[in-house]
Image: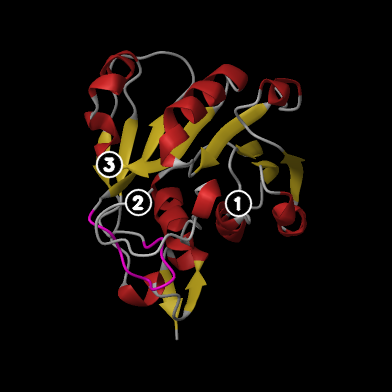
Amino acid sequence: MSSTGRGPRLGGADDFFVTPSWCVRRLLESWSPPGGMWLEPGAGNGAIIRAVNEVRDDVRWTAVECRPEEEAALEAACARVLIGDFLSPNMHSSVDDDIRVVLGNPPFKDAQEFIDRARQLCQRAEIMLLLRLNYVGSEDRAEFMRRCPPDLRTLPNRPSFTASGKTDSIEYAWFGWPPGQRDLGTFRVLASTSLDERKGRGVYLPERQGSLLP
């Protein structure tokens, strides 16, 4: 996910970017999916898993990650870890059919493949992925968007994916697809996030819905 103004990429060849925890907090304040088994299809070092675990105690995780060096961090986040490519045909037999939620931040270049594979492997699951808001604006994806319109939850503050903390010129949103088929999606703007929380200053208190203690 690179764009004007982003600065040096953290992702390298693996397109790996750590999802800021506040992005997950804002999502969970407006979205209450069922507990049970959740899947992170491109888990990285487990940032999304840890952010969910801050506010949910009813989730069990399966984490898929292509980089073996992240296995220990993911296991520490209480996840069942599958080292491999989520898009590989071999992954089909490894993913449980009782997945209730697919939650992640896929590589942008492979986002549609991640969506298609998640819908194929986890047909009873609700899918929620962090993508550029302009993901809806491609002719290549137009037919899919008409056939499978997503629910959009837009972040009013731009997340940073750089070591410098700078943001790029792109807006981001959580794209959601519930199981089954429907004709229309929904759109909402999530709550704003203070600069202190975005910079990781203070202590997040889930019971106070995003408040911080100094």
Q: Is residue 161 magenta?
A: yes
Judging depth in this view, the residue of 3 and 55 nearest the camera is: 3
At x 55%, y 47%, the residue is: 14
In the picture of the structure, the residue carrying the numbered disc 3 is 133
Measure how far apart labels 2 and 1 are at the Cα level: 17 Å
Residue 61 is drawn in which quadrant?
A: top right
First in sequence: mark 3 or mark 1? 1
In the picture of the structure, the residue carrying the numbered disc 1 is 44
At x 43%, y 62%, the residue is: 22
Measure how far apart labels 3 and 1 are at the Cα level: 22 Å
- Find residue 87 and name its label: none
- Find residue 2 and name its label: 2
Task: Indicate the secondary structure of the residue bearing disc 2.
Answer: loop
Residue 74 lies, in percent from the top left, at 71, 54
Residue 40 is drawn in which quadrant?
A: top right
Question: Taking 100 as reference, is 56 above or below it?
Answer: below
Q: Is residue 74 magenta?
A: no
For label 1, the crowd category at 10 Å Cα-Cα, with few meaning under 14, some 14 to 19 and many 20 or more, is: many
Residue 50 can be seen, yes or no: yes
Q: Which residues are magenta?
A: 160-169
Q: Amino acid at mark 3?
A: Leu
